[in-house]
Amino acid sequence: MLVLFETAAGYAIFKVVDERKLQEVDSIWKEFETPEKANKVVKLKHFEKFQDTTEALAASTALVEGKLGKKLKKVLKKIAAKEAHEQLAIADAKLGGVIKDKVNLSCVHNAVVTELMRGIRTQMEGLITGLQPREMAAMSLGLAHSLSRYKLKFSPDKVDTMIVQAISLLDDLDKELNNYIMRCREWYGWHFPELGKILTDNLTFCKCVRQVGDRTNFATFDLSGILPEEIEVEVKAAAEISMGTEVSEEDTSNILHLCDQVIEISEYRAQLYDYLKNRMMAIAPNLTIMVGELVGARLIAHAGSLLNLAKHPASTVQILGAEKALFRALKTRKDTPKYGLIYHASLVGQSSAKNKGKISRMLASKTALAIRYDALGEDTNAEMGVENRAKLELRLRRLEDKSIKRISGTGKALARAEKYQFKSEVKTYDPSGDSTLPSVPRKRKFEEVEAAEEEQPVFKEKKAKKAKIAELPEEEEHAEELPVKKKKKKVKVEVVEEEEPSTSVAIEPPKKKKKKKKIKEEPTED
């Protein structure tokens, strides 16, 4: 059996002398305790040395990727021509499949081969003759540096690592500046508390304190280069009547030193922001136009690189930075967040609270396209970002104004939109609809109206009908009276009490008289 062993100096082919010693996996390490024992197990058959570091790097890269390099292919063809019946022990199973296809050598990879490789590595200096330990260490170090440099794939055009470091440093500087300025205001506030209320800008406050120092010097110092004339007069007036306590010169010197630190950090922060802006416009111009320099840099830093950010879908870009809120919402079965880091974009900030979700969703979809164009496209122009931002601004204006309704693709919706006309009529108040009566529910109103109709208006209608009956002929009179008397009997009580001078009463049939008698008895019972 043959063994393929890769080193930083070249390829080594070993021949296994005694295969019986490799039967027990646990005892193989004992055979490689000393170089003498190792030479009894394996012997060097062929060694192919690399000419320079470039050749070694190409061979190592091919092995890492599971490919068969040119150098190794030549060596294996020579061996296959001489000893085609032998098996080849290799350390990578993927490489074994490639060797079997191209060189037609049967390869072996198992636990015994792994232990054998480990033993050869421990006694490599004794097994491979002609290599000094110092030269071997130098070759290994050089190959490691070259391989690491190749894996980094350093590109001066798209250096998103610089953006990640710059935005992280910018955030750290903001935190430190806030702490320093708060400490400076509190510290100097014991001496001159009124100055902190007059000067709201932090950098102006520190510059003013650094130049003047003690509050008694405000009357003599000229602050026209720092403050406007009106504020300068107000500061000098407040210094004369200040309620602050007196401080020593040592305290003042420490406060001034802190002010120097704040001013220097502020200047460096402005310089770093300009650098970040230039790098973002060079690496991701479309992303910068869509969401701005800071938000775009934070998205890249959160994803790790611009290429990783390009692999994210638009829904992930929308909530990137709100992972805790997302998993909490999924766990508690509540509404998921609408936005993450993209919330700080200018387009989302311009929209109202009602439309922030819509705008963030549309902005995330266009931003995802811009990121992929920047990361994978060959052009470096920002035309796509400008065009998409103009569309989003128009959409935002429509949502905010609410003057143009959302038109879907259906024909009915388009027809309704075409018929719509804006009417600028001024409506005036109509006082005729006013009423002093209390408002009554609809059901109660109908019940009361029906009760009132039964009590009063019905009697008047019946009386009018009786008067009409008197004028009708006899046949029509009988036809009219019968249905009226059958419907409501209470009305007949009123008719009987009244004395009407009509001849129609004498001609009534006997049945009607009996009914009238019954009706007369009803009020007596009541």
Image (cartoon, rainbow, N blue to C red):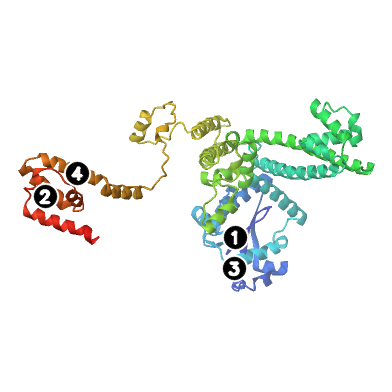
Q: Residue farthest to the right?
A: 249
Tag on residue 482? 2
Disc tally is 4
Q: Which element carries disc 2, helix, strand or loop?
A: helix
Residue drawn at x 58%, y 60% is 90
Foreground pick, 50 / 453: 453
Q: Which element carries disc 1, helix, strand or loop?
A: loop
| Viewer-side label of 1, 2 | 2
Foreground pick, 398 / 196: 196
| Viewer-side label of 4, 1 | 4
| Crowding near the residue tagged with mark 4, few <14, some 14–19, many ≥20 C-alpha atoms within 10 Å | some
| Viewer-side label of 3, 4 | 4
Residue 241, horizontal then vertical, whole percent? 88, 36
**How far apart, in angstroms, are the residues tagged by discs 1 and 2?**
119 Å
Nearer-N-terminus badge (1/2)? 1
| Viewer-side label of 2, 3 | 2
Tag on residue 112? 3
Q: Is residue 209 left or right of residue 55?
A: right
In which quadrant is the N terminus drawn?
Answer: bottom right
